[in-house]
Image (cartoon, rainbow, N blue to C red):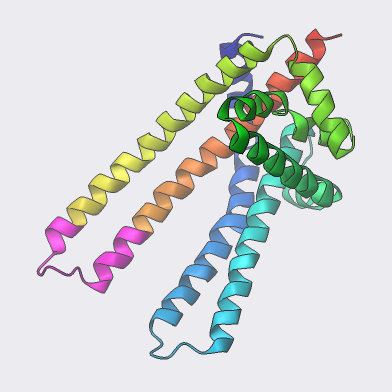
Amino acid sequence: MRFNDIFSRSWQEYKKNFKLFLKIYSVFYLIPLLVLSLFAVLISLQENLSAGLSVLYIIILIGVLFFSYWLHLTIYYISIYNEKNLNFKKAVKNSLKYFWKFLGLGIVLSLALLGLSILLIIPGIIFMIFWMFSPYVLMKENKKIIESMKTSKKIVKGKWWSVFGYFILLILIIISISLAFFIPAVIINFLIILLTSTSETPGLSVVISTEIISFIFRLAATLITTPLMILFFKNFYLDLKASKK
């Protein structure tokens, strides 16, 4: 149950399912955001923004949020049900069975942690760690929302500091990976602006170029960090659960 072992196992699973993750991100992340971006450009070209366009923009934005949630739900499903012949269609379809329960858990956890954090920061951190494995319990053991939170707490009990330490270590790795993509994007964008600027106000082509580059680097970073993080805590959950037997 060492950190290195869990991380190595998670990384191997990530590489094994990379093509599947790439397809999920293309459908649920890339395409919706491109549609939203193109529509935002269309709106910016309008002199007088009509009520119909405003409503349509809000609908598209809600759609982007919906697909973002579905993306995370599907990745959780893939991490738990890592079947040999699992494909895109099967993963997306089967993840829908947990759509409302997973959403309900997210709302309950958010409200509970927000309430605890408003009172005092420390209780919020304590229970965030206790409830960290609730999504895996809910999906793997098919338990109800509150029961999943209670089960997660039982799994973490007696191991809180270990879970907290592993959480901090993983967050540091995730930040390092993100910076590895963020810093080159900043440098490239700076060079583009520096080499193409002929006035104080950058041209439209420069703005579009820098936005595209930033988007590509953000996409690459999240394509690695989000699935890897979900896989890591899934494997950690399984190890802790096995150690309780």
Residue under the point 72% across and 34% down: 79
Picture quadrant of residue 16: top right
Q: Compare residues 225 and 9 and report the one nearer the observer.
A: 225
Residue under the point 73% across and 21% down: 237
Picture quadrant of residue 139: top right
Residue under the point 77% across and 22% down: 153
* Percent x, y of residue 63: 65, 66
In the displayed structure, does residue 155 sit left or right of residue 34?
right
The residue positioned farthest toward the front in the image shown: 119
Picture quadrant of residue 160: top right
In the displayed structure, does residue 22 sit left or right of residue 242?
left
In the displayed structure, does residue 84 sit left or right of residue 67?
right
Question: Does any portion of residue 140 appear in the rendered image?
Answer: no
In the displayed structure, does residue 81 sit left or right of residue 2?
right
Magenta span: predominant SS is: helix
State the extent of the magenta-drawn residues as a range.
193-211
Placement of 3 over or under 54, stated as above or below: above
* Percent x, y of residue 233: 66, 26
